[in-house]
Amino acid sequence: MGRTLKDKVVLITGSGSGMGRSHAVLMAERGARVAVHDIDPDRVAETAGLVREAGPEPYEICVDVRDTDALRDAIEDTERAYGPVDVLVNNAGIGGQGLALGDIDAETFDAMFEVHVRGAFFATQAVVPGMKARRAGKIVNISSNFAMGGSHFASHYAAAKSAISGLTKCWARELAPFDITVNAVAPGLLETNLTLGSIGRERIAAMAAEVPLGRIADPVEISYAVAWLASAETDFMTGQVISPNGGVSIIGI
Ligand SMILES: NC(=O)c1ccc[n+]([C@@H]2O[C@H](COP(=O)([O-])OP(=O)(O)OC[C@H]3O[C@@H](n4cnc5c(N)ncnc54)[C@H](O)[C@@H]3O)[C@@H](O)[C@H]2O)c1
Protein backbone atom coordinates (compact mmCIF):
# COMPACT_ATOMS: atom_id res chain seq x y z
CA MET A 1 0.00 0.00 0.00
CA GLY A 2 1.46 3.37 -0.98
CA ARG A 3 1.53 6.72 0.72
CA THR A 4 -2.22 7.27 0.30
CA LEU A 5 -2.30 9.86 3.08
CA LYS A 6 0.83 11.83 2.20
CA ASP A 7 0.92 15.18 4.04
CA LYS A 8 -2.66 14.87 5.30
CA VAL A 9 -3.19 16.13 8.84
CA VAL A 10 -5.08 13.39 10.68
CA LEU A 11 -6.43 14.07 14.18
CA ILE A 12 -7.30 10.92 16.13
CA THR A 13 -9.09 11.24 19.47
CA GLY A 14 -8.20 8.59 22.04
CA SER A 15 -5.11 7.58 20.07
CA GLY A 16 -3.10 6.85 23.21
CA SER A 17 -3.75 3.12 23.08
CA GLY A 18 -5.49 0.22 21.35
CA MET A 19 -7.01 0.81 17.96
CA GLY A 20 -6.46 4.59 18.01
CA ARG A 21 -2.73 3.99 18.42
CA SER A 22 -2.80 1.44 15.61
CA HIS A 23 -4.63 3.92 13.32
CA ALA A 24 -2.02 6.57 14.17
CA VAL A 25 0.93 4.34 13.31
CA LEU A 26 -0.59 2.94 10.10
CA MET A 27 -1.61 6.36 8.83
CA ALA A 28 1.86 7.76 9.62
CA GLU A 29 3.35 4.87 7.59
CA ARG A 30 1.11 6.03 4.75
CA GLY A 31 2.53 9.54 4.95
CA ALA A 32 0.00 11.28 7.23
CA ARG A 33 0.95 13.90 9.79
CA VAL A 34 -0.82 12.63 12.90
CA ALA A 35 -2.18 14.69 15.80
CA VAL A 36 -2.27 12.35 18.79
CA HIS A 37 -5.05 13.32 21.23
CA ASP A 38 -5.83 11.39 24.42
CA ILE A 39 -6.91 11.99 28.00
CA ASP A 40 -3.81 10.19 29.33
CA PRO A 41 -0.47 12.05 28.96
CA ASP A 42 1.71 8.91 29.21
CA ARG A 43 -0.28 7.22 26.48
CA VAL A 44 -0.01 10.33 24.27
CA ALA A 45 3.78 10.28 24.65
CA GLU A 46 4.01 6.52 23.96
CA THR A 47 1.91 6.71 20.81
CA ALA A 48 3.79 9.80 19.60
CA GLY A 49 7.06 7.85 19.97
CA LEU A 50 5.73 5.03 17.79
CA VAL A 51 4.34 7.47 15.22
CA ARG A 52 7.70 9.23 15.07
CA GLU A 53 9.36 5.91 14.14
CA ALA A 54 6.73 5.24 11.48
CA GLY A 55 6.45 8.56 9.66
CA PRO A 56 6.33 12.35 9.93
CA GLU A 57 6.69 14.18 13.25
CA PRO A 58 3.37 13.98 15.17
CA TYR A 59 1.58 16.64 17.21
CA GLU A 60 0.82 15.65 20.81
CA ILE A 61 -1.94 16.96 23.01
CA CYS A 62 -3.63 15.77 26.17
CA VAL A 63 -7.37 16.48 26.29
CA ASP A 64 -10.57 15.04 27.72
CA VAL A 65 -13.20 14.88 24.95
CA ARG A 66 -15.93 15.28 27.62
CA ASP A 67 -14.72 18.82 28.35
CA THR A 68 -16.17 20.64 25.35
CA ASP A 69 -14.33 23.95 25.88
CA ALA A 70 -10.99 22.20 26.40
CA LEU A 71 -11.64 20.03 23.34
CA ARG A 72 -12.34 23.08 21.17
CA ASP A 73 -9.16 24.76 22.47
CA ALA A 74 -7.09 21.62 21.83
CA ILE A 75 -8.35 21.38 18.25
CA GLU A 76 -7.70 25.08 17.71
CA ASP A 77 -4.14 24.65 19.10
CA THR A 78 -3.59 21.66 16.82
CA GLU A 79 -4.71 23.56 13.73
CA ARG A 80 -2.70 26.68 14.63
CA ALA A 81 0.51 24.80 15.42
CA TYR A 82 0.32 21.85 13.04
CA GLY A 83 -2.02 22.76 10.18
CA PRO A 84 -5.70 22.44 9.22
CA VAL A 85 -7.24 19.06 10.00
CA ASP A 86 -7.89 17.10 6.79
CA VAL A 87 -9.14 13.96 8.55
CA LEU A 88 -10.82 13.59 11.94
CA VAL A 89 -11.12 10.13 13.48
CA ASN A 90 -13.59 10.13 16.39
CA ASN A 91 -12.17 7.14 18.23
CA ALA A 92 -11.99 7.97 21.99
CA GLY A 93 -14.03 5.47 23.94
CA ILE A 94 -14.70 3.71 27.22
CA GLY A 95 -15.96 0.21 27.93
CA GLY A 96 -19.22 -0.87 29.38
CA GLN A 97 -19.44 -4.45 28.21
CA GLY A 98 -20.59 -6.88 30.84
CA LEU A 99 -23.29 -4.66 32.35
CA ALA A 100 -26.93 -5.77 32.29
CA LEU A 101 -29.77 -3.25 32.05
CA GLY A 102 -30.32 -3.24 35.82
CA ASP A 103 -26.62 -2.61 36.53
CA ILE A 104 -26.36 0.65 34.56
CA ASP A 105 -26.90 3.66 36.82
CA ALA A 106 -27.46 7.23 35.61
CA GLU A 107 -23.84 8.24 36.09
CA THR A 108 -22.55 5.27 34.07
CA PHE A 109 -25.13 5.94 31.35
CA ASP A 110 -24.20 9.65 31.11
CA ALA A 111 -20.45 8.91 31.02
CA MET A 112 -20.99 6.58 28.06
CA PHE A 113 -22.77 9.29 26.07
CA GLU A 114 -20.39 12.05 27.17
CA VAL A 115 -17.29 10.28 25.87
CA HIS A 116 -18.67 8.68 22.71
CA VAL A 117 -21.46 10.97 21.54
CA ARG A 118 -20.74 14.38 23.05
CA GLY A 119 -17.00 13.92 22.36
CA ALA A 120 -17.49 13.03 18.69
CA PHE A 121 -20.17 15.68 18.23
CA PHE A 122 -18.10 18.62 19.44
CA ALA A 123 -14.82 17.46 17.90
CA THR A 124 -16.64 17.35 14.57
CA GLN A 125 -18.24 20.72 15.18
CA ALA A 126 -14.77 22.19 15.78
CA VAL A 127 -13.16 20.94 12.53
CA VAL A 128 -16.08 21.37 10.13
CA PRO A 129 -15.91 25.17 9.55
CA GLY A 130 -12.33 24.86 8.24
CA MET A 131 -13.23 21.81 6.13
CA LYS A 132 -16.21 23.67 4.66
CA ALA A 133 -14.05 26.67 3.79
CA ARG A 134 -11.54 24.37 2.06
CA ARG A 135 -14.33 22.29 0.51
CA ALA A 136 -12.53 19.09 1.56
CA GLY A 137 -12.42 16.83 4.56
CA LYS A 138 -12.99 13.34 5.87
CA ILE A 139 -14.59 12.31 9.11
CA VAL A 140 -14.31 8.72 10.25
CA ASN A 141 -16.40 7.78 13.28
CA ILE A 142 -15.87 4.65 15.32
CA SER A 143 -19.09 2.79 16.00
CA SER A 144 -19.35 -0.91 16.98
CA ASN A 145 -20.93 -4.06 15.65
CA PHE A 146 -23.07 -3.88 18.83
CA ALA A 147 -24.85 -0.95 17.11
CA MET A 148 -25.75 -3.31 14.26
CA GLY A 149 -26.73 -6.55 15.95
CA GLY A 150 -27.33 -5.40 19.53
CA SER A 151 -25.79 -6.92 22.62
CA HIS A 152 -27.15 -8.73 25.62
CA PHE A 153 -24.83 -7.01 28.09
CA ALA A 154 -23.99 -3.44 27.09
CA SER A 155 -27.15 -1.63 26.04
CA HIS A 156 -25.86 1.83 27.04
CA TYR A 157 -22.69 1.22 24.99
CA ALA A 158 -24.70 -0.08 22.01
CA ALA A 159 -27.00 2.95 22.29
CA ALA A 160 -24.07 5.38 22.24
CA LYS A 161 -22.56 3.56 19.26
CA SER A 162 -25.96 3.59 17.50
CA ALA A 163 -26.00 7.36 18.00
CA ILE A 164 -22.57 7.47 16.33
CA SER A 165 -23.97 5.58 13.33
CA GLY A 166 -26.93 8.02 13.21
CA LEU A 167 -24.66 11.06 13.39
CA THR A 168 -22.58 9.57 10.57
CA LYS A 169 -25.60 9.48 8.25
CA CYS A 170 -26.84 12.95 9.27
CA TRP A 171 -23.45 14.61 8.88
CA ALA A 172 -22.88 12.81 5.57
CA ARG A 173 -26.05 14.42 4.20
CA GLU A 174 -25.39 17.82 5.75
CA LEU A 175 -21.76 18.05 4.64
CA ALA A 176 -21.93 16.42 1.19
CA PRO A 177 -22.51 19.79 -0.52
CA PHE A 178 -19.08 20.81 0.80
CA ASP A 179 -17.31 17.67 -0.49
CA ILE A 180 -16.77 16.44 3.07
CA THR A 181 -17.34 12.71 3.48
CA VAL A 182 -18.47 11.11 6.74
CA ASN A 183 -18.32 7.36 7.30
CA ALA A 184 -18.07 5.00 10.24
CA VAL A 185 -16.20 1.82 11.04
CA ALA A 186 -18.05 -0.58 13.34
CA PRO A 187 -15.46 -3.09 14.57
CA GLY A 188 -16.25 -6.48 16.02
CA LEU A 189 -14.61 -7.56 19.26
CA LEU A 190 -10.92 -6.89 19.90
CA GLU A 191 -8.66 -7.41 22.87
CA THR A 192 -7.72 -3.90 24.02
CA ASN A 193 -7.57 -2.07 27.37
CA LEU A 194 -11.26 -1.33 26.87
CA THR A 195 -12.43 -4.94 26.65
CA LEU A 196 -9.81 -6.34 29.02
CA GLY A 197 -11.07 -3.84 31.62
CA SER A 198 -14.76 -4.55 31.08
CA ILE A 199 -15.14 -8.26 30.29
CA GLY A 200 -11.66 -9.73 30.72
CA ARG A 201 -9.54 -12.18 28.75
CA GLU A 202 -11.59 -15.34 29.43
CA ARG A 203 -14.85 -13.89 28.19
CA ILE A 204 -13.09 -12.38 25.17
CA ALA A 205 -11.77 -15.87 24.31
CA ALA A 206 -15.25 -17.36 24.68
CA MET A 207 -16.71 -14.71 22.37
CA ALA A 208 -13.87 -15.21 19.87
CA ALA A 209 -14.90 -18.85 19.55
CA GLU A 210 -18.33 -17.70 18.29
CA VAL A 211 -16.88 -15.58 15.48
CA PRO A 212 -17.34 -17.28 12.08
CA LEU A 213 -13.72 -16.56 11.14
CA GLY A 214 -12.73 -18.18 14.46
CA ARG A 215 -10.82 -15.30 16.01
CA ILE A 216 -10.96 -11.67 16.99
CA ALA A 217 -9.31 -8.91 14.93
CA ASP A 218 -5.84 -7.57 15.24
CA PRO A 219 -6.15 -3.76 15.69
CA VAL A 220 -4.39 -3.10 12.40
CA GLU A 221 -7.18 -4.95 10.56
CA ILE A 222 -9.52 -2.19 11.75
CA SER A 223 -6.94 0.48 10.92
CA TYR A 224 -6.89 -0.68 7.28
CA ALA A 225 -10.60 0.23 7.03
CA VAL A 226 -10.12 3.56 8.82
CA ALA A 227 -7.14 4.52 6.64
CA TRP A 228 -9.10 3.61 3.51
CA LEU A 229 -12.04 5.81 4.54
CA ALA A 230 -9.54 8.61 5.24
CA SER A 231 -8.04 8.36 1.75
CA ALA A 232 -9.05 9.70 -1.65
CA GLU A 233 -9.93 6.11 -2.65
CA THR A 234 -13.29 6.62 -0.91
CA ASP A 235 -14.10 10.10 -2.22
CA PHE A 236 -17.41 8.81 -3.60
CA MET A 237 -18.38 7.00 -0.40
CA THR A 238 -20.30 8.80 2.34
CA GLY A 239 -22.81 7.94 5.07
CA GLN A 240 -21.64 4.32 5.22
CA VAL A 241 -21.03 2.15 8.24
CA ILE A 242 -18.61 -0.67 7.44
CA SER A 243 -18.05 -3.47 9.90
CA PRO A 244 -14.88 -5.59 9.96
CA ASN A 245 -16.17 -8.20 12.41
CA GLY A 246 -15.08 -11.65 11.26
CA GLY A 247 -18.63 -12.45 10.14
CA VAL A 248 -20.55 -11.99 13.40
CA SER A 249 -23.20 -9.88 11.72
CA ILE A 250 -23.97 -12.77 9.37
CA ILE A 251 -25.07 -14.94 12.25
CA GLY A 252 -26.32 -12.11 14.40
CA ILE A 253 -24.39 -12.60 17.62
N1 LIG B 1 -12.23 -3.16 21.70
C1 LIG B 1 -13.34 -3.50 21.06
O1 LIG B 1 -13.76 -4.67 21.07
C2 LIG B 1 -14.13 -2.46 20.32
C3 LIG B 1 -15.11 -2.90 19.41
C4 LIG B 1 -15.84 -1.95 18.70
C5 LIG B 1 -15.58 -0.60 18.88
N2 LIG B 1 -14.62 -0.21 19.76
C6 LIG B 1 -14.37 1.23 19.88
O2 LIG B 1 -13.07 1.52 19.40
C7 LIG B 1 -12.58 2.72 20.02
C8 LIG B 1 -11.19 2.48 20.58
O3 LIG B 1 -11.29 1.55 21.64
P1 LIG B 1 -10.15 0.49 22.03
O4 LIG B 1 -10.81 -0.81 22.07
O5 LIG B 1 -8.95 0.71 21.19
O6 LIG B 1 -9.89 0.91 23.55
P2 LIG B 1 -8.66 1.55 24.33
O7 LIG B 1 -9.10 1.64 25.74
O8 LIG B 1 -7.39 0.84 24.03
O9 LIG B 1 -8.55 3.02 23.69
C9 LIG B 1 -9.42 4.07 24.01
C10 LIG B 1 -8.60 5.33 24.21
O10 LIG B 1 -9.51 6.42 24.45
C11 LIG B 1 -8.96 7.22 25.49
N3 LIG B 1 -10.01 7.94 26.17
C12 LIG B 1 -10.95 7.42 27.01
N4 LIG B 1 -11.74 8.41 27.48
C13 LIG B 1 -11.29 9.57 26.92
C14 LIG B 1 -11.68 10.92 27.04
N5 LIG B 1 -12.69 11.27 27.85
N6 LIG B 1 -11.02 11.85 26.31
C15 LIG B 1 -9.98 11.49 25.52
N7 LIG B 1 -9.54 10.22 25.38
C16 LIG B 1 -10.20 9.27 26.08
C17 LIG B 1 -8.25 6.22 26.41
O11 LIG B 1 -7.27 6.86 27.24
C18 LIG B 1 -7.66 5.24 25.42
O12 LIG B 1 -6.34 5.58 25.05
C19 LIG B 1 -13.64 3.10 21.05
O13 LIG B 1 -14.50 4.08 20.52
C20 LIG B 1 -14.39 1.81 21.27
O14 LIG B 1 -15.69 2.02 21.76
C21 LIG B 1 -13.89 -1.10 20.48
Image (cartoon, helix red, strand yellow):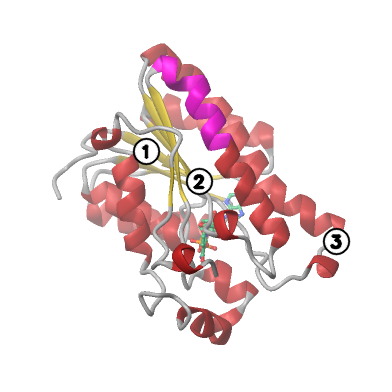
Sequence-earlier tag: 1 or 3: 1
Quickly name the residue at label 1: 10
205 and 214: which is toward the camera: 214
Quickly name the residue at label 2: 13
Ligand 1 is within 8 Å of the C-beta of the residue at disc 2: yes
Q: Residue at left 67%, top 31%?
A: 69
Quadrant housing the C terminus:
bottom right
| Main SS, magenta residues | helix
Q: Residue 83 is drawn in which quadrant?
A: top left
Is residue 65 visible in the rendered image? The answer is: no
| Three-letter amino acid code at the position of disc 3 | Asp
Quickly name the residue at label 3: 105
Q: Residue at left 81%, top 64%?
A: 104
Sequence-earlier tag: 3 or 2: 2
Q: Residue reaching furthest front?
A: 251
Mark 1–mark 2 Cα distance, whole angstroms, equals 10 Å
